[in-house]
Image (cartoon, rainbow, N blue to C red):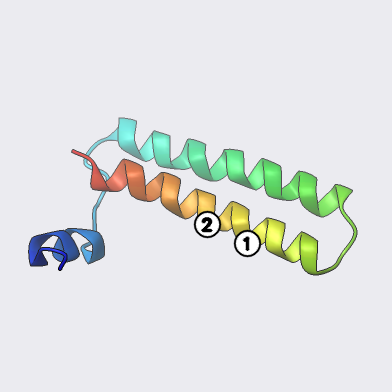
Amino acid sequence: MIPPDDIEHRFAFHAAPNQEKRDAHTSVRQACRRLADHINETCPDGREKSLALTAIEEAMFWGNAALARQP
């Protein structure tokens, strides 16, 4: 069983405590956006393109979660 405090940490809001963290979040979002734009412009529409864009969204989420959840 996962400890309750771990569940609490996973689902809590983690505000960026300083400008450095806010900038890191912005950097991750911007890098993912550039890749998403490239995939959108380069790849034909279809299931594979949709999955690629979803994977980029997931990468952005997990990258920002890593930044937010660590002290």
- Name the residue beneath numbered marker 1: 54
At 59% from the left and 38% from the top, the residue drawn is 31
Left or right of 46? Residue 10 is: left
- Name the residue beneath numbered marker 2: 58
Q: Is 56 placed above or below 35 here? A: below
Q: Residues within 10 Å of mark 2 (few under 14, many from 20)?
A: few
Q: Position of residue 3 (x, y in %)?
A: 10, 63
Q: Quadrant of residue 34?
A: top right
Residue type marked 1: Thr
Left or right of 35? Residue 62 is: left
Question: Looking at the figure, which quarter contains the N terminus?
Answer: bottom left
- Element marked by disc 2: helix
Is mark 2 in CB contact (under 8 Å) with mark 1?
yes
Q: Position of residue 49 (x, y in %)?
A: 78, 60
Residue reaching furthest top? 20
Left or right of 60? Residue 1 is: left
